[in-house]
């Protein structure tokens, strides 16, 4: 008898085969169960305590999963899903996880029967292609300029969120903001950059109803010399700078030996003249408002205020870009290079107002602004954070519509239609792939089923009735009204989803399910090599950023 050969170190744990598959499926189902109750308009909220002891109250799938700290690698990749979904289309973060969890759940039976994972994946991918084809069939094109339709759509997206009770308020804000910043690229394409050009300013106090979209930009700054500079300017000429208006100090310590006393005066005079030159170059263009990202010395401030120019200093770069977009100015790096075309004249009003206990500078009433600020007011910080998250979702949805103006029925109707179509198609599939294909068809029913569960109606009866309706052609738009749990026509109730979100949800969910099914080996307990002589280092809590979330080191238990 030979001695057993040790290939792996003792500290390593290796699991392989079906054991891994089951572990992965269970982990993913656990994640799906966490946020299953947050799907639909009757959804529950989750309250999370983050590391700093702050409280997050939300039902946005991605916001919840972001806060969770998971040990299981498969569960971690599920969380990546909802993050991807959030960045790609901004909505449907919950459905993606529920769907992926269900896809894996139905695959479990096949793994027990010793199906090869590749076979299951192949069937799933086929199901994905067919389901996207079904989506294309039932999609309904809309007219983006028709405000009522878009409003209905954005409302059905926020109906599932906490701010659903404020009805049109958030939807209006979102549509206003996105239509403002939309840029036509030609060929019917529209580029809407939410992250860059829409700033959400949260000001605690006041009521939610006071929130509004400003036709321009608001920044949390006051003018440099409040007493001397004007705080209200009509039709200001705005110059944006990226350079400091102060005397440059030497790089390192420089010593200047002065022999005569007059030299000292000359030195000071040179500094003064330098700044005066800078200011004169700027004042040539008769601006009313100068905004710089860097410092502004007292002397420069004096020259500017003498000329009746207001100045704001140390502005964030992003804010500066937004102002540039809003009033049509160009951010200039050196005062020497200023041209008349760089001066922004698009703004109608510059004003500094006091809100609560802070000063805010407004640059508003712009002509055709390409950037805007959404001003949110609310009672408490937590409320504002939640409203902001919902607004993000709403803006993403209206952005998706502007990009791809096609609608699908909400309320689980789309999923049921896809499911029915796949069931019919499965009979024509030959060979062993038929069964997983059918299972994928059944898995799509997870979404309407969850909706029914969250409403608290009789799930089995509702589902059977719905399946019966969808088995007959022509009922593609029948689904569940998430508030009452009744079976209704989605066209009448105006419950819609945008095509981009649904297609992305299906793709992400199925591809992720395939990826997790293909894992057949987990080796854990890999230690980093330590430098010789170094003792065990005290482990610091590692703060993850997006970069290293992928190459996760799995710690041994």
Image: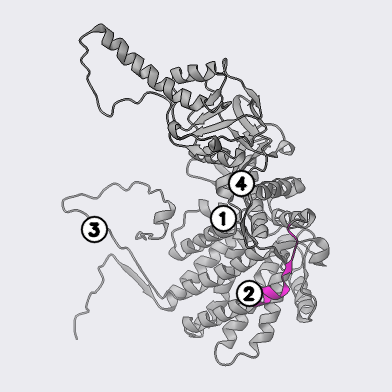
Visible in this render: residue 303?
Answer: yes
Q: Is residue 531 left or right of residue 270?
A: left
Q: Is residue 52 left or right of residue 32?
A: left
Point out the frontmost of discs 3 and 2: 2
Residue 327 at x, y percent in the picture = 61, 38
Per the model, the C-alpha gap separating discs 2 and 4 is 34 Å
Residue named by callout 3: 529
Q: Residue lying furthest left in this view?
A: 533
Identify the image quadrant of residue 347. top right
Per the model, the C-alpha gap separating discs 3 and 1 is 35 Å
Residue named by callout 1: 62
Residue named by callout 4: 57
- Provide the residue span drawn in magenta: 132-144
Let me know if residue 138 is in the magenta part: yes
Residue named by callout 2: 132
Q: Please state which of residues 205 and 98 is positioned toward the viewer in this rendering.
A: 205
Residue 408 at x, y percent in the picture = 71, 67
Q: Please state which of residues 482 and 126 is positioned toward the viewer in this rendering.
A: 126
Per the model, the C-alpha gap separating discs 2 and 1 is 24 Å
Residue 217 at x, y percent in the picture = 61, 37
């Amino acid at each position: 008898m030979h001695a057993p050969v040790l290939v792996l170190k003792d500290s390593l744990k290796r699991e392989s085969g079906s054991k891994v598959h089951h572990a992965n499926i269970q982990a993913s189902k656990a994640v799906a169960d966490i946020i299953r109750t947050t799907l639909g308009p009757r959804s529950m909220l989750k309250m999370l305590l983050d590391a700093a002891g702050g409280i997050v109250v939300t039902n946005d799938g991605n916001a919840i999963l972001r806060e969770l700290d998971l040990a299981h690698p498969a569960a971690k990749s599920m969380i990546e899903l909802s993050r991807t979904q959030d960045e790609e289309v901004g909505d449907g973060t919950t459905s993606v996880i529920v769907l992926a969890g269900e896809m894996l759940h139905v695959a479990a039976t096949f793994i027990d029967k010793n199906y090869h994972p590749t076979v299951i994946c192949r069937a799933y991918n086929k199901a994905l292609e067919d389901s996207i084809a079904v989506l294309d069939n039932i999609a309904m094109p809309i007219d983006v300029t028709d405000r009522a339709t878009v409003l209905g759509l954005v409302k059905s997206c926020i109906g599932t969120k906490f701010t659903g009770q404020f009805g049109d308020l958030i939807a209006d804000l979102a549509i206003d903001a996105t239509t403002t910043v939309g840029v036509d690229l030609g060929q019917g394409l529209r580029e809407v950059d939410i992250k860059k050009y829409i700033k959400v300013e949260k000001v605690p106090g006041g009521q939610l109803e006071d929130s509004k979209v400003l036709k321009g930009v608001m920044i949390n700054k006051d003018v440099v010399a409040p007493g001397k500079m004007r705080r209200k300017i009509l039709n200001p000429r705005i110059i944006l700078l990226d350079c400091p208006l102060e005397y440059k100090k030497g790089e390192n310590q420089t010593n200047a030996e002065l022999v005569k006393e007059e030299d000292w005066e000359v030195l000071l005079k040179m500094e003064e003249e330098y700044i005066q030159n800078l200011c004169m170059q700027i004042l040539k263009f008769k601006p009313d408002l100068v905004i710089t990202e860097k410092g502004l010395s007292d002397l420069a401030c004096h020259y500017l205020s003498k000329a009746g120019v207001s100045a704001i200093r140390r502005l964030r770069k992003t804010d500066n870009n937004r102002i540039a977009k809003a009033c049509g100015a160009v951010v200039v790096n050196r005062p020497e290079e200023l041209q008349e075309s760089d001066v922004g004249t698009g703004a109608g009003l510059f004003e500094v107002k006091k809100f609560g206990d802070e000063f805010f500078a407004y640059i508003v009433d712009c002509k055709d602004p390409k950037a805007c600020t959404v001003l949110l007011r609310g009672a408490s910080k937590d409320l504002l954070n939640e409203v902001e998250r919902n607004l993000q979702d709403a803006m993403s949805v209206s952005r998706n519509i502007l990009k791809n103006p096609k609608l699908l029925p909400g309320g689980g109707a789309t999923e049921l239609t896809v499911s029915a179509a796949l069931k019919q198609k499965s009979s024509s599939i030959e060979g062993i792939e038929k069964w997983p294909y059918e299972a994928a068809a059944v898995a799509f029913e997870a979404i309407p089923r969850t909706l029914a569960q969250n409403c608290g109606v009789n799930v089995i009866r509702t589902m059977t009735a719905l399946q019966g309706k969808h088995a007959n052609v022509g009922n593609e738009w029948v689904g569940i009204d998430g508030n009452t749990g009744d079976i209704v026509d989605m066209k009448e109730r105006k419950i819609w989803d945008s095509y981009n979100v649904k297609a992305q949800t299906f793709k992400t969910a199925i591809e992720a399910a395939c990826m997790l099914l293909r894992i057949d080996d987990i080796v854990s307990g890999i230690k980093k090599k330590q430098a010789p002589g170094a003792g065990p280092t005290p482990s610091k809590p590692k703060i993850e950023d997006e970069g290293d979330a992928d190459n996760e080191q799995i710690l041994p238990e």
